[in-house]
Image (tube, helix red, strand yellow):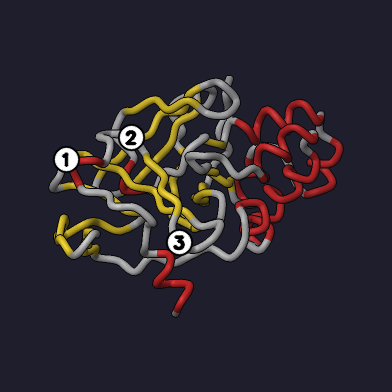
Amino acid sequence: MQRILRYHVVGSRIDQSAIPTMVNTVYQTTLADNQISVYKVNNSDISVNNGKIIQGDNPTVGSVVHIINALLKPATVNLVALAKSNTNLSLFAAAVDRANASTQSTLNAVMQNGMTIFAPNDAAFKAAGYADAAAIQKADQAVISDLLLYHVLKYSAYSQTFQNGADVVTAQGTSIRTNVSGGKVTLLGKGNGTSVANVVTADQVASNGVLHVIDRVLLAK
């Protein structure tokens, strides 16, 4: 309970007007190694991780309280460890192990603005031609490294903050397109034609960012 409470506290006063607009902004909480991601469309539409502020700017002595509609859950592991704990991401985990040291360092990094990983599930990797972990280990290391970085954003982005028709730049340097319809998020890689990837499990919290499981491997070309 102490961990949960500390995860809901930031060590400085942040009024709604002080939150940047249309930018994923990360704030360090009073729980070590755990950050929250805040996204403001306007003062009446502010996301905090996977929750929303429903009553903001409640003043107290020397601080301010924002009431949200979700309990925020602190992380216990980083993104790579979180992915490896999911049996349906075994091929993604094999790809991480196959990647070069630079890519592995990026995936394990603690960045100022956090990180987002779109992790293709095992069925997605098989559909992309990687039948099993052995096939990934035989694949060109540079290809696997480039593929993984195309599934990474260098900031924490929760599902409700994605904008319809937006092109977002990945850690690989090429963009992907996000589409939102009826609360459903899909992604389109530049090499995927019209075949989108669905976000099938969203907003998995890690100590250095957030992970979304998708059902298609994104292709940069």
> Which mark sits nearer the N-terminus, 3 or 1?
3
Q: Where is residue 2 in the image (x, y as percent from the top left)?
A: 46, 77
Q: Position of residue 112 (x, y in %)?
A: 52, 39
Q: Is mark 2 on a helix, strand or loop?
A: loop
Pointer 1 with pointer 2, Cβ within 8 A: no
For the residues marked 2 and 3, what is the alpha-carbon distance in whole angstroms? 22 Å
Please indicate whether residue 27 sits to the left or right of residue 43 in the image: right
> For the C terminus, which image quadrant?
top right
Say what secondary structure mark 3 lies in: loop
Please give the name of the residue rendered at 66% of the width and 37% of the height, measured from the top-left corner. 106
The amino acid marked with disc number 1 is: Asn
Viewer-nearest of labels 2 and 3? 3
Locate the N terminus and report the quarter of the image it occupies: bottom left
Q: Which amino acid does label 2 sit on?
A: Val
Say if 95 sits above or below 79 in the image: above
Label pair 2/3, CB-CB below 8 angstroms: no
Q: Is residue 53 above or below residue 23?
A: below
Of labels 3 and 1, the one closer to you: 3
* Residue occupied by mark 1: 42
Sooner in the amino-acid sequence: mark 2 or mark 3: 2
Assess disc 2: are there few (<14), some (14-19) or many (≥20) residues with their C-alpha within 10 Å of its C-alpha: some
Q: Residue type at mark 3?
A: Thr
**Residue 142 appears left or right of 24:** right
Q: Mark 3 points at which residue?
A: 30
Q: Residue furthest bottom?
A: 1
Q: Which of 142 and 59 is in front in this view?
A: 59
Q: Which of marks 1 and 2 is nearer the N terminus?
A: 2
